Structures are given as C-alpha cells and as structure tokens.
Amino acid sequence: MTRPPRLSPDEIAAALHGLPRWSGDGDGLRRTVALPSFRDAVAAIVAIADVAEEMDHHPDVDLRWRTLHLGLVTHSAGGVTDLDLELARRIDALLPD
C-alpha cells in the first residue's frame, strides 16, 4: 500500500479547522476524550481498533481509567498525512462530543 505524503504545517492547520476536537502539528494529531465509564472507554478502543484494522493505520491509544488519549501520525511518512486526517474523522464519528 502506498502511503500519502506528509502534509505541510499550513495544510495541517487548515485541516484542524474541520476537526475541532483534535489538536496537533507536523509531529502528530491528538485528542483526549472522557467516557462515562471504564467499560465505555474499552468499548471505544475496540470500535477504534476495528476502523484502524480496516484502514491498516493504527493510532496510539493511552487509556487512563475512563479517559482515552489518542495520537495519530503516519510513521512511514515522518509526520501527519491525509491518512491521519481520515482516521481522525472516522474516530470522531465513533466517539461522543
């Protein structure tokens, strides 16, 4: 699978306007979300894992009780790509505001 090229800082900044729950820069995108319970957080990880497997693009996930810390970066490109933006959009569709 050919990976998309790394995005410029301006491209990332523009894309983040459409992803208000995410922050980031050329080194990666980040989102933190608190879920109602530990079980809800684990269920969210499973849902994210299903999407990640489908895309063959896997986020960094850190679970702290009921809070998920998510990180996206295309390591093979050395930074953020369109693949990260698409995964962020798909994760947003799975998680509550």
Image: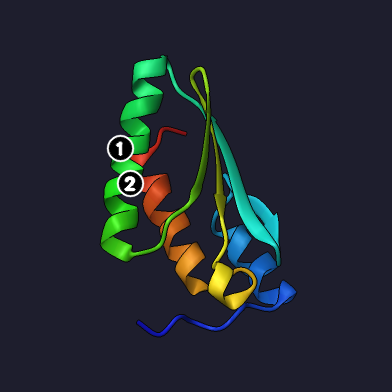
Q: Which residue is mark 1?
A: 46
Element carrying mark 2: helix
Element carrying mark 1: helix
Instruction: List the single residue furthest toward the top.
Output: 37
Q: Residue at x 62, y 59 (%)?
A: 17
In the rendered image, residue 63, in percent from the top left (x then y), is placed at 51, 29
* In front of the other: 18 or 95: 95
Scheme by which the image is coloured: rainbow
The answer to whether residue 34 is above or below residue 89 is: above
Residue 11, picture quadrant: bottom right
* In front of the other: 77 or 47: 77
The reply to whether dot 2 and dot 1 touch (C-beta < 8 Å) is yes
Image quadrant holding the N terminus, namely bottom left
- The amino acid at mark 1 is Val
Q: Residue at x 49, y 82 (%)?
A: 4
Q: Residue at x 72, y 75 (%)?
A: 10
**Residue 18: numbered disc:** none
In the rendered image, residue 50, in percent from the top left (x then y), is placed at 26, 48
| Circle 1 residues within 10 Å: few <14, some 14–19, many ≥20 | few
* In front of the other: 24 or 18: 24
Q: Which residue is mark 2?
A: 49
Instruction: List the single residue furthest toward the front.
Output: 76
